[in-house]
Image (cartoon, rainbow, N blue to C red):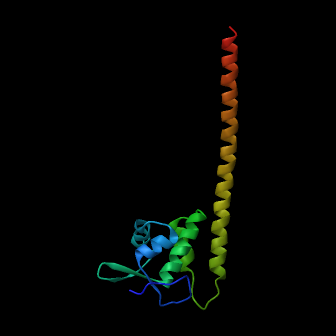
Amino acid sequence: MAKAAAKGSDTSAEYSISQLAKEFNITTRSIRHYEDVGLLSPTRSGQTRIYTQADRTRLRLILRGKRLGLSLEDSREIIDMYEPGKTNVDQLKKLIDAIQLQRNKLNQQLDDISKLLKDLNRAEADCIDALKTNGNQ
């Protein structure tokens, strides 16, 4: 198997699972999981997985979706919408929708955390006041 050079545009580049794991700082187990759920489809030479530039790009997009908080299924839908030579307007709209949904979810969590912190501060202050009151008796 030819070793892939830098991140060039060589569409004939081939990558091993360990090369991709090292490049993206993830485990080979993660890559195999993405294969198991149908997000990646490497060819095989015996037991050896051979990943193409397209697989590498899909992996990069999967990991980007993960960083954005998208589910693997959402990432799959968005990635699978890509059709070379065609406009990617629908794909971009779907990604925007997913981003907005994730942002709304995070804002709700942030609001919930803020309320919880206020409740904790109030409970702590009540406990401190109770200790002071009990200490003066």
Residue situated in front as seen by the camera: 93 or 68: 68
Q: Position of residue 18 (x, y in %)?
A: 41, 73
User: Can you say whether 59 is above or below 2 in the image?
Assistant: above
Above or below residue 29? Residue 12 is below
Residue lying at 69% horizontally and 44% vertically, measured from the top left: 114
Q: Quadrant of the C terminus?
A: top right
Asked if one can make out residue 8 in the rendered structure from this viewpoint, the answer is yes
Residue at the image position 63 percent from the left and 61 percent from the top: 102
Residue 92, image quadrant: bottom right
Q: Position of residue 62 (x, y in %)?
A: 53, 71
State the residue at coordinates (47%, 87%): 13
Quadrant in the picture for residue 17 = bottom left
Q: Residue at x 66, y 75 (%)?
A: 93
State the image coordinates of residue 119 (x, y, percent, origin top left).
68, 35
Query: Horizontal placement of 47 versus 13: left or right?
Result: left
Residue sitting nearer the eye, 133 or 110: 133
Q: In the image, is residue 102 above or below residue 77? A: above
Q: Residue furthest left?
A: 46
Which quadrant is home to the N terminus? Answer: bottom left
